[in-house]
């Protein structure tokens, strides 16, 4: 009898009816930080868990004894980190159970792809444009000072419905570049350098190289190297800071109404300290579509403030949303709790900007205090943009921020 039980246990542990040979490696119990209407990006470090190649791994969700295969993606740059998305399911509660198996190889291309031209890297989902990173230098219109040229910015950021939500080189601010990350007042070697207002010709930011590119069933994205260059009083530009900027676009294959964009900014002073001085704007700026104004769009912050009162306030998240053509689009900007000066100050343009209420939004960590950066150290800012074609409520934004700011608790049981 004992031999029969042993044989049964052996076959239960090493086989699944629809995969053939399969051996369970570990069980993962995931406790979510919130019940949400949006997917939860989740990851575990495979180092110490398994040394098997990615091609023979399988991830399944266990629900009432039923097994459902889950698409996953492994990032080899971070000690082999396995990533997957947990779809929203109000009826499954806060705890979800997964198993990692060794099984027969399977190639899963996934919905997210990268397409590179000679000027830009474009993230697409099933052939639809979502996000464009521009690495080539873009020059201003003819007759405008060429000092306004720059590279290394996102435009367009599209809604899932295909609407461009960014704008570059508007006549009122030729130095505005969609979604971009310069600093306005930086003290370097005793000089105060403006990397933001390009017409001052004190400094600029440029794309230097790609670090990584990745695509797959869970996310597509990139890491790039930017150089913050000092121009004034120098025969040749001098690098004051380097920046590794990354973006990962997460999307469920069966959801056409939203995607998530995780943005990371890692700063390193080149050789001497850099102090980012207190100023009313700087860092991650977003010049929105010209189709939004004070009549068809709104701002809501995590503290319940609107566009009239949001500027200068502190926020964990901020919704910017409104009608666009015959459709709707919304973005929830989220700040990580680990960011400098979190909850972060906001720079939101006033309702009467240029008479029609043009929209601009900025998490500005140095809006109310200096930030001193030492060489040899890394300084990181992390953000998430939830981009949707539907109106987002404050309650939905709060749950989405908890998914970003409060990572799920994962309990691992190895076999």
Image: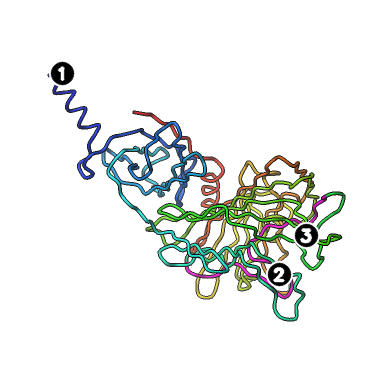
Tell me, yes or no, whether the highlighted magenta stretch contains residue 169: yes
- Label 2 – label 1 distance at C-alpha: 77 Å
- Label 1 – label 3 distance at C-alpha: 77 Å
Tell which residue pokes out farthest to the front in this image: 235
Circles 2 and 1 in contact, beta carbons < 8 Å: no
Magenta stretch: dominant secondary structure: loop
- Label 2 – label 3 distance at C-alpha: 15 Å
Please, is residue 412 above or below residue 345 in the view?
above
Q: Residue at x 47, y 61 (%)?
A: 114
Please tell me whether mark 2 or mark 1 is closer to you in this view.
2
Mark 2: few/some/many CA within 10 Å (<14, 14-19, 20+):
many
Please tell me whether mark 2 or mark 3 is closer to you in this view.
3
> The magenta stretch spans which residues?
161-188
Q: Dividing the image into 4 quarters, which one contains the N terminus? A: top left
Of labels 2 and 1, earlier in sequence is 1
- Using the rendered view, name the quadrant where residue 360 is placed: bottom right
Q: Residue at x 34, y 33 (%)?
A: 25
Image location of residue 215, percent across then percent down: 45, 55
Tell me, yes or no, whether the highlighted magenta stretch contains residue 277: no
Q: Dividing the image into 4 quarters, which one contains the C terminus? A: top left
Q: Residue 91 or 41: which is nearer the viewer?
A: 41
Circles 2 and 3 in contact, beta carbons < 8 Å: no
> On residue 237, which mark appears?
3
């Amino acid at each position: 009898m004992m031999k029969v039980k042993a044989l049964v246990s052996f076959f239960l542990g090493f086989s699944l009816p629809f995969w053939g040979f399969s051996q369970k490696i570990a069980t993962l119990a995931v406790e979510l930080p919130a019940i949400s209407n949006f997917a939860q990006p989740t990851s575990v470090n495979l180092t110490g868990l398994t040394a098997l190649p990615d091609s023979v791994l399988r991830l399944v969700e266990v629900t009432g004894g039923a097994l459902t295969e889950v698409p996953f993606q492994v990032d080899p740059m971070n000690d082999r980190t396995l990533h997957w998305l947990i779809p929203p399911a109000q009826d499954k509660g806060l705890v979800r159970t997964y198993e990692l198996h060794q099984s027969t190889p399977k190639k899963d291309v996934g919905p997210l792809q990268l397409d590179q031209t000679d000027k830009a890297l474009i993230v697409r989902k099933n052939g639809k444009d979502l996000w464009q990173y521009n690495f080539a230098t873009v020059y201003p219109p003819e007759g405008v000072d060429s000092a306004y040229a720059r590279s290394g910015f996102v435009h367009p950021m599209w809604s899932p419905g295909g609407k461009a939500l960014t704008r570059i080189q508007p006549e009122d601010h030729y130095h505005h570049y969609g979604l971009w990350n310069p600093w306005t007042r930086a003290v370097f070697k005793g000089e105060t350098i403006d990397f933001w207002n390009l017409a001052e010709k004190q400094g600029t930011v440029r794309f230097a190289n790609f670090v990584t590119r990745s695509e797959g069933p869970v996310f597509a994205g990139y890491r790039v190297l930017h150089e913050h260059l000092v121009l004034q009083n120098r025969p040749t530009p001098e690098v004051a800071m380097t920046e590794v900027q990354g973006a990962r676009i997460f999307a469920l294959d069966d959801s056409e109404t939203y995607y998530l964009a995780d943005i990371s900014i890692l700063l390193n002073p080149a050789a001497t300290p850099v102090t980012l001085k207190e100023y009313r704007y700087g860092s991650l700026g977003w010049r929105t579509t010209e189709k939004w104004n004070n009549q068809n769009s709104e701002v809501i912050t995590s503290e319940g403030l609107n566009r009239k009162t949001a500027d200068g306030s502190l926020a964990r998240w901020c919704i910017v949303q409104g009608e666009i053509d015959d459709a709707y689009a919304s973005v929830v900007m989220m700040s990580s709790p680990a960011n400098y000066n979190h909850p972060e100050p906001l720079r939101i343009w006033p309702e009467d900007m240029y008479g029609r209420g043009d929209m601009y939004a900025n998490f500005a960590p140095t809006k109310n205090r200096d930030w001193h950066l030492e060489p040899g150290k890394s300084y990181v800012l992390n953000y998430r943009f939830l981009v949707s074609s539907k109106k987002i409520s404050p309650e939905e934004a709060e749950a989405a921020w908890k998914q970003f700011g409060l990572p799920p608790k994962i309990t691992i049981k190895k076999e």
